[in-house]
Image (cartoon, helix red, strand yellow):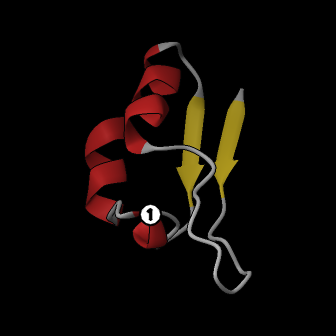
């Protein structure tokens, strides 16, 4: 399955659809996870956090 995590576009919205730890679990199960640049910044997750989790 392909899973995409978009960056939130609404103002004052700080949630992200999937945290890096859960993205890692999906990848371990054989799924492909795509993360839009800066998708987790408002929630405190950097692009490097996602790269480390899904690489």
Using the rendered image of the protein, determine whether residue 34 is visible from the camera's viewpoint.
yes
Question: What residue sits 32% from the left and 38% below the top?
Answer: 53
The quadrant of the picture occupied by the C terminus is top left
Using the rendered image of the protein, determine whether residue 55 is visible from the camera's viewpoint.
no
The quadrant of the picture occupied by the N terminus is top right
| Count of residue discs | 1
Q: Nearer the viewer, residue 2 or 7?
A: 7
- Residue 23, percent from left and from top: 48, 35
Left or right: residue 44 compared with residue 4: left
Secondary structure at numbered mark 1 = helix
Q: Quadrant of residue 33?
A: top right
Q: Residues within 10 Å of mark 1 (few under 14, many from 20)?
A: few
Q: Quadrant of residue 43?
A: bottom left
Residue 16, compared with residue 11, is above or below; it is above
Question: What residue sits 25% from the left and 44% below the top?
Answer: 52
Q: Nearer the viewer, residue 34 or 18?
A: 18
Q: Quadrant of residue 8?
A: bottom right
- Residue 36, percent from left and from top: 56, 65
Q: Which residue is mark 1?
A: 43
Residue 45, compared with residue 20, is above or below; it is below
Q: Nearer the viewer, residue 10 or 37?
A: 10
């Amino acid at each position: 399955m392909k899973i995409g995590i978009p960056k939130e576009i609404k103002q004052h919205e700080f949630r992200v659809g999937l945290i890096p730890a859960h993205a890692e679990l999906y990848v371990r199960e054989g799924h492909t996870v795509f993360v839009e640049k800066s998708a987790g910044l408002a929630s405190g997750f950097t692009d490097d956090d996602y790269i480390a989790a899904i690489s």
